[in-house]
Amino acid sequence: MTISSELQAAFEQARTDSQQLTERPDNATLLKLYALYKQGSDGDNTQARPGFSDIVARAKWDAWNGLKGCAQDEAMRQYIELIGSLD
C-alpha cells in the first residue's frame, strides 16, 4: 500500500499540532490518539503484550491492538480528524 505524500504530510502536521494543544485531552482520548498514531505509522501491532504489572503500557498496547486490521491510511485520516477536533 502506498500512502500519498499529502496524507503523510497532513499526518505529520497533526502530530506536531498534537504537541501544541491548549488543553490536555482525557485519558481515553489520549489512548485513542496513541493507537491511531501507532496504527498509522507502524501498521498492525505485532509486539508482545506487556506484563500485568505495567498498567500504562498494557492499556496502550490494548488500544493499539484494538485497531488491528485498520488500514494505515484510514488510521492516519482518523488521527488527523481527531487532532483537528481537539484544538
Image: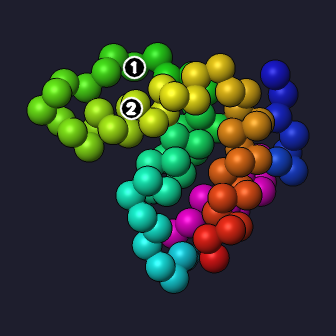
Q: Earlier in the sequence, mark 1 or mark 2?
A: 1
What residue is at 87 percent from the left and 40 percent from the top?
Answer: 4
Q: Which mark is residue 11?
A: none
Instruction: Residue 10: give x, y in percent of width and height.
Output: 77, 56
In front: label 1 or label 2: 2
Q: Tell me whether the residue at label 1 lies in contact with that at label 2, contact meaning CB atoms closer than 8 angstroms.
A: yes
Q: Is residue 46 left or right of residue 72?
A: left
Extreme residue in the bottom direction: 22
Residue type for callout 1: Gln
Say which mark, if any, is on residue 61.
2
Q: Which residue was labeled with disc 1?
A: 47
**Residue type, label 2:** Trp
- Where in the figure is residue 50, as x and y percent of width and height? 25, 26
Q: Which residues are magenta?
A: 8-19
- The local crowd at label 1, few if under 14, some if 14 to 19, many if 20 or more residues have their Cα within 10 Å, is few
In this orientation, does residue 16 appear?
Answer: no
Q: Residue visible at 73% across and 27% down?
A: 71
User: Which of the 4 quarters of the picture holds residue 59?
Assistant: top left
